Every structure is written in C-alpha cells, then in structure tokens.
Amino acid sequence: MSSSKTEKGGEQEVRVSTHSGYRADERPLHFILEGRKHVVKKVLDRWREPDEDYFRVKTADDQVHVLKREREADRWFVIRKE
C-alpha cells in the first residue's frame, strides 16, 4: 500500500488497499484520493504493461477512475478520472 500523496507527470499518487489472491495486489479494494476514501465497486477493465498494472474501476459513488501500479516500486497512481 502506497503511503504518500505526490504528483508525477499529471498522475496523483494514492494509497490503495488491495485484495491479494494468487498474486500480490491482485486488484484494488479502495483508494484514498485527496483525503477521501473511494471504495471500488467493480473492476471494469485491467491490463498489464512490462512494469505496470492498470485498472479501470467504478467506485461506490459511480465515479470511474484509471489506477496504475508500478510493480517494482509498489506505488499506485490515479492517472485519470472519466
């Protein structure tokens, strides 16, 4: 779980709690963005890049966000809100 809130190229680093199944950080359960907890209701899409995992999620309040996890650094970012 990431702990700091910084920005990197327009992306905002967030704290994320995850479900770990057959691999670590299998999917996000909730994330803290600007001091507010967003509960993930549904993972709409997910994809992997060589060093990163991406999740397009719908939150309990029906917002859609795209989250990115940098696997090596174990850092999470919100890269956009749709």
Image: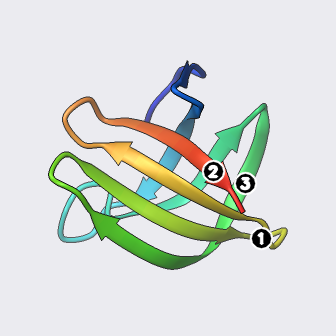
Report, in whole angstroms, how far the alpha carbon at label 3 lies from the one at label 2. Answer: 14 Å
* Residue 70, quarter of picture: top left
Relative height, residue 55 to residue 33 (above, below)? below
**SS category of the residue bearing label 3:** strand
Q: Which amino acid does label 2 sit on?
A: Arg
* Residue 66, quarter of picture: bottom right
Q: Earlier in the sequence, mark 1 or mark 2?
A: 1
- In the displayed image of the protein, which residue is found farthest to the front? 9
What percent of the width, then of the height, locates residue 68?
43, 49
Eye-nearest disc, 3 or 2: 2
Q: 25 or 45, which lies in front?
A: 45
Relative height, residue 41 to residue 30 (above, below)? below
Q: Which amino acid does label 1 sit on?
A: Ala
What percent of the width, then of the height, locates residue 47?
32, 69
Left or right side of 62 for 57: left
The residue where tag 3 is placed is 38
Residue 80: mark: 2
Discs 3, 1 touching: Cβ within 8 Å: yes
Crowd class of label 2 (few under 14; some 14 to 19; many from 20; radius 10 Å): some
At x 27%, y 49%, the residue is 52
